[in-house]
């Protein structure tokens, strides 16, 4: 059983897209352990992408129990989660149907967000809305299970859906619990949850937030120009600015840290594209290490092969549910390594397509911190450094969303003196990768090919999808 060196210990929990993670860490930054447990997603041909909230909770319990932390040492807990993902629960907190995840394409006709998901549910399954005690984002469902307190996590720029919008959507406003600022005390760990997690009842629980915002904290972002590659299944880039920066199609909101703005965009399938190639296409016959080694052996530019990572439609910057992935430039001399390299470069080009207009508007990336999944070696990190033309920093703890949850737990429970202080004490960089100037011209050409590919294919893809639907 892990023990702290005198500093209070906090626990962070992250309900990610494919697994739950838990971290135990001292407020002085001493890492005590990270646990994880997975759960499946039910994908359907109609665009369905749902998960079982009971499987979430079982995974959370397994992940936290694997930490083997001394319950008496835990000073606070916070849970963050994927989003926007909708959970409908009854008065006991039990889910009435599978959660509608952020990957679900059925709801996108009404837009992207929590309100469109509620709108879709009210129109297609009104009986579920009628029976529901609460309609909650995933992070707030987790908070309810931990404490028994129903609340809607809010940020400075977002107080949650207003009464008029909910009524127009067909959702009784009383189904959405009162707002509670993220990072503030939510309640105490209730006995039933404590028993499931192997902890003591009464530990302070702090209000969570979406895992994208948590990742900014866990990556150690503090200054204008600091940015994080949020990694994970979807991928995205968030940049800190010292003033509001408006770019159509990209977000701009107060950052988790005071005095900063967060600007950027979230994609749909950057990490998922690697999984798709390795599993669905290559049949899991090669390990990630073997594939990344092959990609590293291919020169920058992937031999002229360009990959469009729109396997689940796309969010920023095109926001097109009908967008689809594509390889372009294939020739007989290309092999497996070229395909892997093209997928890795395509993800970096997608990030550049968000970063470039933000830089032009006054919010440049000065350093990019990597987050999410651990990848073999530095090949993907070096590609991102080369494509974006900025240093890439690799954090000591790459699981930045769950670390961000722990930082919120430390500040919100009073175990740390404040959020800024917790970020400074609980994050660190392991090493940095400098961009290789010799690859810049090659990637400029590759990026222009990437940018041209989607407009060239858009009309044809829409026509094909329309004919299939007919």
Image (cartoon, helix red, strand yellow):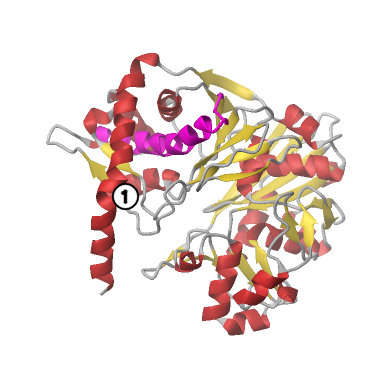
Q: Main secondary structure of the magenta part?
A: helix
31 on left or right of 274: right
Q: Which residue is drawn at 84% across and 41% down?
A: 73
Seen from the viewer's position, the closer of residues 335 and 25 is 335
Q: Quadrant of residue 253?
A: top right
464 on left or right of 347: left
Q: Position of residue 280 (x, y in %)?
A: 31, 52
Residue 364: say if magenta: yes
The magenta-colored residue range is: 337-366
Q: Mark 1 points at which residue?
A: 325
Q: Quadrant of residue 70?
A: top right
Q: Residues within 10 Å of mark 1 (few under 14, many from 20)?
A: some
Q: Which residue is drawn at 39% across and 35% down?
A: 349
Q: Which residue is drawn at 59% across and 54% down?
A: 82
Residue 10, above or below 126: above
Q: Where is residue 360 in the image (x, y as percent from the top left)?
A: 50, 31
Q: Which residue is drawn at 24% across and 35% down?
A: 305
Residue 287 visible to an observer of this rendering: yes
């Amino acid at each position: 059983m892990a023990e702290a060196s005198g500093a209070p210990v906090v626990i962070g929990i992250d309900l990610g897209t494919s697994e739950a993670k838990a971290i135990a860490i001292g407020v002085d930054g001493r890492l005590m352990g990270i646990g994880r447990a997975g759960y499946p997603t039910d994908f359907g041909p109609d665009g369905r992408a749902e998960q079982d909230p009971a499987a979430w909770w079982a995974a959370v319990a397994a992940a936290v129990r694997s930490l083997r932390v001394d319950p008496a040492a835990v000073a606070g807990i916070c849970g963050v989660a994927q989003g926007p993902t909708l959970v409908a629960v009854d008065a006991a907190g039990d889910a009435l149907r599978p959660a509608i995840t952020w990957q679900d394409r059925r709801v996108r006709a009404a837009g992207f967000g929590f309100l469109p998901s509620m709108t879709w549910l009210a129109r297609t399954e009104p009986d579920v809305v009628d029976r529901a005690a609460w309609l909650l984002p995933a992070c707030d469902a987790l908070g309810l299970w931990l404490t028994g307190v129903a609340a809607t996590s809010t940020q400075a720029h977002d107080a949650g859906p207003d009464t008029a919008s909910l009524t127009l959507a067909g959702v009784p406003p009383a189904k959405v619990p009162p707002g509670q600022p993220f990072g503030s005390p939510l309640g105490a760990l209730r006995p039933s949850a404590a028993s499931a997690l192997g902890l003591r009842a009464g530990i302070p629980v702090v209000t969570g937030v979406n895992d994208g915002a948590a990742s900014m904290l866990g990556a150690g972002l503090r200054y204008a120009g600091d940015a994080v590659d949020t990694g994970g299944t979807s991928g995205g880039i968030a940049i800190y600015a010292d003033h509001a920066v408006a770019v159509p199609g990209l977000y701009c909101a107060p950052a988790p840290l005071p005095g900063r703005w967060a600007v950027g965009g979230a994609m749909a399938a950057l990490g998922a594209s690697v999984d798709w190639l390795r599993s669905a296409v290559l049949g899991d016959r090669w390990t990630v290490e073997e594939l990344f080694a092959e990609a590293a052996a291919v020169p920058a530019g992937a031999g002229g092969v360009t990959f469009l990572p729109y396997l689940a439609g796309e969010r920023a910057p095109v926001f097109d549910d009908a967008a689809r992935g594509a390889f372009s430039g294939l020739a007989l001399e290309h092999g497996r390594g070229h395909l892997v390299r093209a997928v890795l470069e395509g993800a970096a080009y997608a990030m550049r397509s968000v970063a470039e207009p933000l830089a032009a508007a006054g919010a440049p990336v000065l350093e990019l911190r990597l987050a999410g999944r651990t990848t073999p070696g530095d090949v993907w990190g070096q590609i991102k450094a080369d494509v974006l033309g900025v240093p890439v920093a690799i954090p000591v703890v790459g699981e930045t969303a769950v670390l961000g949850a722990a930082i919120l737990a430390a500040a919100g429970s009073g175990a740390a003196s404040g959020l800024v202080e917790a970020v400074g004490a609980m994050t660190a960089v392991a090493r940095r990768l400098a961009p290789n100037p010799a690859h810049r011209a090659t990637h400029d050409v590759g990026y222009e090919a990437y940018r041209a590919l989607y407009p060239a294919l858009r009309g044809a893809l829409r026509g094909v999808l329309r004919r299939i639907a007919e």
